[in-house]
């Protein structure tokens, strides 16, 4: 479904591969991972400035979540809009990432469960679907 | 550094004041502060304005220069500081340091804010920058501020096995205190049942468990020991003021970040913990010396979590302490006798100065129906967007 979709912010989400990937960066010295890509390493014990691209992909562990029941200010282009879950997920790259959980799983969330990073269309730009990153339960293949 | 004292405080009641300009709110707060100090504009050598809700000066700002041009052009020093919701405390810290340095004798810190309705949105004019967390949290997931706080609140329930009832009880306590404060916007008590019957905004947080946005203004005039002595009455000394930013590895869901790299051993909300601990160090005190705290209760979660974060008691104990009455006005650690943000609604840059007004009223025994019994040492703790933390300790 997302084959032809474009990311809502192209610089931060890569939909060109088999799996959706957030475009992070990793410090080549201390290994700290950043999303979005950082200008430099912020670890005060590191001091290295060298960062390399680090795709944030795969399965993570649900740290916490909420359900946003009221429509946010207009910058979020979900159309049509309906309440959705937002989650914090500890990704294997060592970074905790925030994102929407695919709508049909909103009632099934439990802290500690495994979620997979994916993408989902949230709006249309003319003919082209627009997608954002989204988490789905790890055992959900649909 | 020489000692610095509070000479006067003043405020405009919090609320929605569409007919009153920001400058008028500011002037009202200043006038009240002058009335309590027998000082006037001509006595001020400096005015520090909590001027920006956002880094970069964007948004709804207050400028000391504009206030002075509406009140008294006598050449005083005007300083405008940012710090988002902590800006009021940053302004206070700046005024404190200006006098402590010996270069100025009488300086006021001022905050005044008129807030747009609803969820706090991106500052007008902010660029669409894909490396900016604030841009990404809106465009890629539409995450409001309450969503961040709610995820903390949800995690707390998981970590300690607590009940959402504790959030409702915390909100009800704040509203009970606020009902005794004529400066608070919400003057009506609510029961925990009414809190839980209010709309669910961001699970597990209901409307009454999340601070509204308000218009308001607060001012604090600072001066020397000699001035304070001359004024008579209880002398309120600034035991310390401190400002800090966040530490790498902080596990907090920090607005407006969309990712973090939590590390073992780094305090949660490290900008506030760092500021408070530094304030304690500078004052030579610890949590056992604090007779009351005004903390930034953007939600009911903050009422429970912050006393633990700051080290007043072990993590997970706040629910029980709240239920036992420890956080009440006559409890062991009165939390937000003013009623807090949940009773005021946040007038962002003015809020930290309202906290300091309350510390002063409490220490002077002027808090009326919400008076904490005979406090000697009182502190504030506040958090601002952009990982700004600040804390002030006042002493009678």
Image (cartoon, coloured by chain):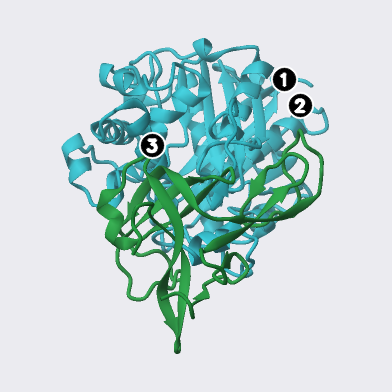
- Res. B346 mark: none
The residue wearing badge 1 is B3
CA–CA distance in space, label 3 to label 2: 42 Å
Tags 3 and 2 both on a single chain? yes
Give the quadrant of the N terminus of chain A.
Answer: bottom left
In the image, residue A41 above or below residue A4:
above
Q: Residues within 10 Å of mark 2 (few under 14, many from 20)?
A: some
Mark 1 element type = loop
Whether residue B37 is visible? no
Q: Nearer the viewer, residue B323 or B67?
A: B323
Residue B288: x and y in percent read 50, 10
| Residues at circles 1 and 2 in contact by the CB criterion of under 8 Å | yes
The residue at the point 37 percent across, 38 percent down is B153
The color chain B is rendered in: cyan
The residue at which mark 2 appears reads as: B100
Residue drawn 58% across the image and 67% down it: A14
Q: Nearer the viewer, residue B382 or B10?
A: B382
Is B296 rendered above or below residue B282?
below
**Residue B207, percent across and down?**
29, 49
Mark 2 belongs to chain:
B
Q: Residue furthest bottom?
A: A127
In the rendered image, which residue does mark 3 sit on? B155
Q: Nearer the viewer, mark 3 or mark 2?
A: 3
**The quadrant where residue B47 appears:** top right
Asked if marks 1 and 2 fall on the same chain, the answer is: yes
């Amino acid at each position: 479904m997302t084959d032809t979709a474009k990311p809502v912010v192209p610089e931060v989400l890569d939909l060109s591969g088999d799996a959706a990937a957030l475009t992070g960066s990793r410090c080549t010295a201390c290994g700290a991972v950043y999303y979005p890509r950082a200008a430099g390493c912020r670890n005060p014990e590191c001091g290295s400035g060298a960062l390399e691209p680090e795709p944030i992909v795969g399965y993570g562990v649900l740290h916490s979540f909420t359900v946003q029941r009221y429509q946010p200010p207009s910058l979020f282009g979900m159309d049509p809009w309906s309440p959705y879950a937002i989650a914090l997920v500890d990704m294997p790259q060592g970074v905790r990432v925030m994102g929407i959980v695919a709508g049909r799983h909103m009632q099934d969330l439990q802290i500690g469960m495994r979620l997979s990073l994916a993408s989902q269309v949230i709006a249309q730009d003319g003919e082209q679907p627009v997608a954002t990153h989204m988490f789905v339960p790890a055992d959900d293949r649909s | 550094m020489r000692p610095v004292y509070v000479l006067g405080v003043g405020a405009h009641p919090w609320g929605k004041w569409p007919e009153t300009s920001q400058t008028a709110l500011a002037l009202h707060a200043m006038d009240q502060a002058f009335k309590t100090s027998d000082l006037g504009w001509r006595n001020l050598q400096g005015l520090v304005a909590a001027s920006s809700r956002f880094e970069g000066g964007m948004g709804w700002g207050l400028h000391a220069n504009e206030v002075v041009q509406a009140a008294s052009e006598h050449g005083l020093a005007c300083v405008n500081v940012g710090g988002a919701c902590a800006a009021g405390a940053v302004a206070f810290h700046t005024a404190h340091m200006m006098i402590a340095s010996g270069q100025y004798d009488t300086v006021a810190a001022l905050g005044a804010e008129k807030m747009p309705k609803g969820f706090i949105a991106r500052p007008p004019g902010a660029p669409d920058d894909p490396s900016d967390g604030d841009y990404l949290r809106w465009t890629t997931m539409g995450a409001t501020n309450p969503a961040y706080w709610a995820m903390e609140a949800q995690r707390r329930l998981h970590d300690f096995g607590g009940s959402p009832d504790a959030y409702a009880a915390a909100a009800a306590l704040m509203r009970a205190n606020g009902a005794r404060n004529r400066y608070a916007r919400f003057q009506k008590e609510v029961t925990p049942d009414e809190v839980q019957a209010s709309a669910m905004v961001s699970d597990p947080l209901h409307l009454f468990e999340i601070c509204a946005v308000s218009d308001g203004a607060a001012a604090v005039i600072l001066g020397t020991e000699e001035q304070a002595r001359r004024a008579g009455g209880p002398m309120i000394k600034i035991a310390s003021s401190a400002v800090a930013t966040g530490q790498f590895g902080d596990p907090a869901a920090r607005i407006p970040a969309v990712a973090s790299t939590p590390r073992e051993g780094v305090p949660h909300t490290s900008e506030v913990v760092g500021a408070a601990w530094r304030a304690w160090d500078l004052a030579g005190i610890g949590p056992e010396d604090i007779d009351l705290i005004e903390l930034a209760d953007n939600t009911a979660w903050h009422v429970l979590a912050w006393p633990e974060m700051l080290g007043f008691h072990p993590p997970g104990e706040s629910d029980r302490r709240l239920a036992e009455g420890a956080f009440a006005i006559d409890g062991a650690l009165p939390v937000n006798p003013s009623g807090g943000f949940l009773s005021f609604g946040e007038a962002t840059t003015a809020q930290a100065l309202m906290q300091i007004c309350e510390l002063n009223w409490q220490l002077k025994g002027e808090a009326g129906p919400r008076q904490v019994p005979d406090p000697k040492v009182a502190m504030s703790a506040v958090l601002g967007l952009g990982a700004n933390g600040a804390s002030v300790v006042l002493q009678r």
